[in-house]
Amino acid sequence: MSKVTVSDFIIALLDLAEAESRAFEKSVENFMQRQREALRDSLYKNGWMVAWIVAAVAALIGAVAFTGWGVYRLFALYLSETAAPFAAGGILLVFAAVFAAFALKMRRQDG
């Protein structure tokens, strides 16, 4: 029967600690790799979402501009050329105020 000395016990304990640290390191590497992939996928999807939102906003701005121009041309037929831009701008300001009030109402409901 062999005797187990204190040094054998310490060596075994340190070997166990080394094996556990390697397993922990591998686990952390796998976790970080999965997190990087998830972040990359999320950024890719969010990037496309932002691009589509920017395209929609650009299209909306163009539509509002053409609508404002059409309203101006309509008012130019019935009003003087000096009053037509003010009338068209006034109508656009009324619509902007209505949309701002709607946005504030929606924001109050969220909070």
Image (cartoon, grey):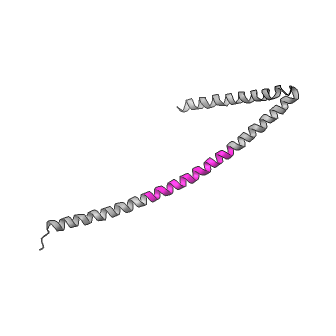
What is the quadrant of residue 20 in the picture?
Answer: bottom left
Q: Position of residue 54 (x, y in %)?
A: 66, 45
- Please tell me which residue is depicted at 41% across the width and 60% down the height of the picture: 29
Indicate yes or no whether the magenta region holds residue 109.
no
Indicate yes or no whether the magenta region holds residue 52.
yes
Q: Position of residue 106 (x, y in %)?
A: 59, 31
Name the residue nearer the viewer: 81 or 79.
Answer: 81
Would residue 5 be found to the left or right of residue 14 on screen?
A: left
Would residue 39 be found to the left or right of residue 98 on screen?
A: left
- Examine the rendered structure and indicate whether residue 1 appears above or below residue 61: below
Q: Quadrant of the N terminus?
A: bottom left
Count of marks, rendered view: 0
Would residue 19 be found to the left or right of residue 100 on screen?
A: left
- Examine the rendered structure and indicate whether residue 3 appears above or below residue 79: below
What is the quadrant of residue 69 in the picture?
Answer: top right
- Please tell me which residue is depicted at 34% across the width and 63% down the height of the picture: 23
Span of residues in magenta: 32-56
- Please tell me which residue is depicted at 82% across the width and 25% down the height of the picture: 83
Q: Position of residue 111 (x, y in %)?
A: 52, 31
Would residue 10 be found to the left or right of residue 77 on screen?
A: left
Name the residue nearer the viewer: 9 or 111.
Answer: 9
- Please tell me which residue is depicted at 72% across the width and 40% down the height of the picture: 61
